[in-house]
Image: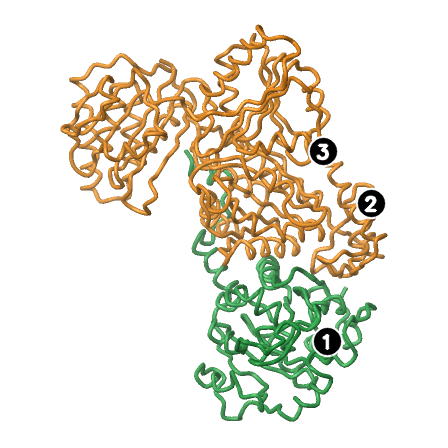
Amino acid sequence: MNELTFAFVGAGGDGAVAAGDIIAGACAREGLHVIKTEAYGPQIRGGESSAVVRVSSAPIHAQADCVDVLVVFSWADFARFENELVVAPDAVIFCEAGDEPPAELSNRTIHPITFKGAAKNVTAIALLASLFGLPLEATRDAVAARFAKKKQAVIDANLAAFDLGIAEGETIEVTKKLTYERSAPHLIMSGNEASAFGAIHAGCRFFAGYPITPSTEILQFLAVWLPKMRGTTLQTEDELAAIGAVIGASFAGVKSMTATSGPGLSLMAEMLGLASIAEIPAVIVNVQRGGPSTGIPTKSEQSDLLHSVFASHGDTPRVVIACSDVEESFHATVDAFNISEEFQIPVIVLTDQSIAQRRETIDAGALEHVVRDRATATPPALADYHRYLDTDSGVSPMALPSTPGGMYQTNGLEHDTQGRPSATFVVHEQMNAKRYRKLDGIAERYPLYRRFGSASPRLGVICWGSTVGPLREAIERIGDDSGIGVFAPQMIMPLPQAPLQEFIDSCDEILIVELSYSAQFERYLRGFVDFPRKRTSVYKRSGGKSLTAAEIESELRRLLVRNETRRPDSPVRRFEGVMS
Amino acid sequence: MTHAPYTAQDYKTDLKPVWCPGCGDFAVLNSVYRALADLKCEPHDTVIVSGIGCSSRLPGYVETYGFNSLHGRALPIATGAKLAAPNLHVIAVGGDGDGLAIGGNHFMHAARRNVDIAYFIMDNEIYGLTKGQAAPTTPHGDKTKSTTYGNPEISIDPCAQAISFGASWVGRAFAGDVKGTTELMKEAITHHGFAFLNIISPCVTWRGDDQMKLLRPLVRPVSLDHDRTDRESAMRFVNEPADRLTVGVLYSAPRASLLDEIIDIRERASGVSMPPGRGEILQAFA
């Protein structure tokens, strides 16, 4: 087999998540490709938890459709993840001896194991590593490394548990085995960590944020690393203060960022307008979760799209960049800083829980990106300084405090080129035009999108963010000769309008894919591009569960079959997504 | 390019204040000019941040870097600016509605963080810009445009709040006393940590054009025996009866500022070693 997916399920304290981490880390060091996800019950501590680790010898872009190897420390805890963990028909299951499996899984291969003591997860890891072709030594090293700071007795107990697992495996036969060639080690990081690292790479030295699931890891990562970089991480009293402090720090000349999720972005809406009218660079990472209101904090959805592109009252230019995997989380964040600094405009990085909180293998070499800086006012401009000089690009040199001769007042009020408050239509029209002109330059310089699948597709798929990975896998399965091509804009605002229209015009049929009940992406696109009137459909559903490759594959196959049989003038049809 | 020493005149911009004739904020503005000149604050090293309201127009009238921001949000912005550029003199200004109602949460946290900024509230006990509605400092029972039958809520004393929130310097001033206000502003600006000065700045339009005249005789300095480092003692001068207006430094207990703490954190995070390179950070993911 060139790939396998392992899952661990147990109560808090069983170490299910730690087991997933250890296997994921060991496989990453072996040069395998890994995507690891976690899920928890609502309890703060001691509740059920699960970890799913997909391991592959070839690059992967999404979570697996189903679990091949399942370790269950407690079936009662497994029952709580019933809808999330799809167990393959030929799955191999290991569970605590004497704990009765549910009837619907009784036809799977089940091996009762007597897991002993506190290190039962380590026993499970060794068992899996020895049976399924995982790197045994690397796994043992990963166990030792994880407990390296503990007392020797703890290390010894865990290594003994490891040996017990190997011994247990000696009596068991399995047919699935991972085969791979060892290669250069990968790093393994989450989307949130990649965003945070991207910020540091881009030169961010000020972060202010308020804890909110599923973005908090960004705050926590930068709380560790920014002080080491002589920077500042500030936990504020709320999201209003977070974006406020970011705007203040950026006004003073330091590259600054905040990170939040939907509810926090709602609170930041007014400040987004301030950054836009005052033309102060600010980067906001918005990790989407199920909404509205508190919604589903721990699950992914693509329903902050319209909020991100339109939030704040008034005519408020801003930039929105999406990312579709961990690596793109890094690049999108650096791009966000580059654009924000260069064009003096707020930029939202739009990601979601499924990308932000999954850990994925990545190469250090991929984490390189050119860094750009703000145009500050220099002596010629300072001679007769107009902070908001109406230029061709819309960008005016910015005097940073401490610059002699650059004193100006910035303003949330409409203002003239010198920053003086103005309530006249003429100034308002002129300044709106100046601020919106920046989007033209950004669209020209950053027409960011991904294109894959067929080069001259009959069926064109348009998707964004976390649905891109599953689509890529679905198309790989269907085959390159299927005539399906994908266009995934990374730049959501401003949209790469011309290439997208060209793509649409070149296809016989268009499918839009998104995880938003009200089809926000489709509605948004319709404001910028024209779709063929009778040949556009939407596959959309609520979030709360990531799109799977299998799910979208079956939709694509259905459309391909239908195309061969239907009349050319069949009516408009919209397809609703169905939870499988 | 240093021009110090400056005179008060040097800090004036050519923008004409929008305030009503007789507004206490004119006097406050004069005190700001004098305080900056006396302290020889370089205009380009000074940032004045405000929220929204009559008094929040002030930054536009002072020849420094200025930021007329959003209603209630001066303090977070001032905090970010100070932490990002510690060499700046950062002064936040605004009204009582701006700072105590919509921005009240930030007041609490800026004070407890002890971020090294001076915060001047121009307290006129009313919403002036929106033309006369009750503010958190409007006395109980007062009739305003929004409390036609009398204010049903009791008022708060911002100095009492500041002390209990952990501000390390708290003072009260009367706008009509420019000399006294100037001295208190100077002390607030030079104080190491969060310094809060509540300036009673009468609104002649919505609180009565005789306010200045009525309040002046009530003004008295803090008693000579007052121990400004003692919180209990400071509390004797808050929530005063209507016939008394004590001005001066009510409380002053310097402690490490937020920036001191952050510098300490940086040292503990990395010692004296160079900032980590990308290799060291990425090692965390190997």
Query: Considering depth in this image, is B165 or A374 the residue closer to the camera?
Result: B165
**Is residue A327 shown above or below B109?**
above
**Is residue A476 shown above or below A350?**
above
Query: Considering depth in this image, is A295 or B94 the residue closer to the camera?
Result: A295
Quadrant holding the N terminus of chain A: top left
Q: Chain of mark 1?
A: B
Q: Is residue B131 left or right of residue A73?
A: right
Q: Provide the secondary structure element on which disc 3 rests.
A: helix
How crowded pointer 1 is (Cα within 10 Å; few <14, some 14-19, many 20+) is rated as many
Q: Residue at x 83, y 52 (%)?
A: A380
- In contact (CB < 8 Å): disc 1 and disc 3: no
Dividing the picture into quadrants, the one containing residue B205 is bottom right
Q: Is residue B102 left or right of residue A399?
A: left
Question: How far apart in space, not on screen, are marks 2 and 3 (Cα)?
Answer: 17 Å
- In contact (CB < 8 Å): disc 2 and disc 3: no
Circle 1 residue: B29
- Where is residue A463? Give x, y as percent: 58, 26
Chain for colour green: B
- Where is residue A116? Give x, y as percent: 15, 34
Q: Provide the secondary structure element on which disc 1 rests.
A: helix
Q: How is the image coloured?
A: by chain
Circle 2 residue: A391
Chain for colour orange: A
Circle 3 residue: A443
- Where is residue A479? Give x, y as percent: 52, 10
